[in-house]
Image (spheres, helix red, strand yellow):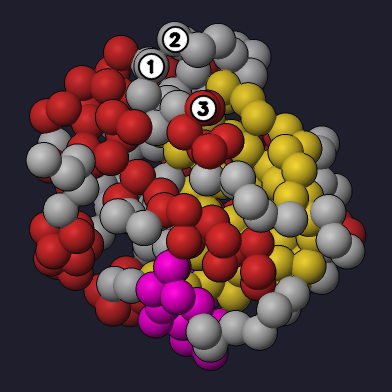
Amino acid sequence: MALIDKDHQAEYWANNPNARRYDHPVVRAFARQRLDWLDGIVPLKNVERALDVGCGDGFATYYMDERVKYVEAGDASELMLKIHPLPAARLHLLDAATMHQFADKSYDLVYAWEVLHHLTSAKKAVAEMVRVSKKHVVIFEPNRDHALQFLFGLAVKHERGILRSTKEYLTSLTEGLPVRIKALSYSGRIPPNKTPESWLPLLLSMPFEGGRYDAISVGMVLERTDV
């Protein structure tokens, strides 16, 4: 039986926002810490145009918009786009696996945070992200080997794709594409939807990069090799 039910995913995200808004203090700490790590690999001040694929209700977009000159975002959920903080003119209704509305090499940076494990066609989505990017693609996914993430994937139907989410799996999605892996790291200690605000000082004091079993995410930065 397939891990991911496409119809269930579509129905769930058409009717449910994230547990916390983009401006919640825990979400803010989570996003800015992640972007600090990325900024050390891809200096964001040099990025002219970025695209957030599977943007949801703005977790990643709002904070990327603080650092990049121009950001657009897209999602398959009309509900998410209605409550997203970016101006409507910069938002797109899209299917991550068939982004035909965007020309080749339209953006300097294309990224997706916690999106691929919801998709039945993750490899096609990565290929489309590479096609639309001029230079860099950034992907963050839950780390299946973290005990709580694994249990979350087992227990919650719309999160079942976590059970395939490993470094090895993400690497396999790049096969045959004109990219090299610039960074691949277990990272982060702050689950944005569940962490009590009082825990932030402790979690922020821990190193962002971690080990296979103690970090909540896997982060991968790709660089096009045909530029």
Q: Is residue 46 visible?
A: yes
Residue located 72% across and 38% down the image = 181
Residue 145 circle label: 1
Q: Position of residue 207 (x, y in %)?
A: 64, 14
**In terms of image quadrants, where is residue 14?**
bottom left
Tell me the amino acid under the disc marked 3.
Answer: Glu
Of helix, strand and loop, which one carries label 3?
A: helix
Q: Is residue 197 left or right of residue 168?
A: left
80 or 210: nearer the viewer? 210
In percent of width and height, residue 60 lies at 53, 54
- Between the residue at mark 2 and the residue at mark 1, the CA separation in whole angstroms equals 5 Å
Question: Disc 3 and disc 2: Cα gap in Å?
Answer: 15 Å
Identify the secondary structure beneath mark 2: loop
Q: Nearer the viewer, mark 3 or mark 1?
A: 3
Q: Which residues are magenta?
A: 83-99
Identify the residue at image location x=65%, y=69%.
131
**Which mark sits nearer the N-terminus, 3 or 1?**
1
Q: Which residue is mark 3?
A: 168
For residue 213, the mark is 2
Query: In the image, what residue type sits under mark 2?
Result: Tyr
Instruction: Check whether the beta carbons of the residues at disc 2 and disc 1 lie within 8 A of each other.
Output: yes
Tell me: residue 173, above or below residue 48.
above
Q: Is residue 192 above or below residue 60?
A: above
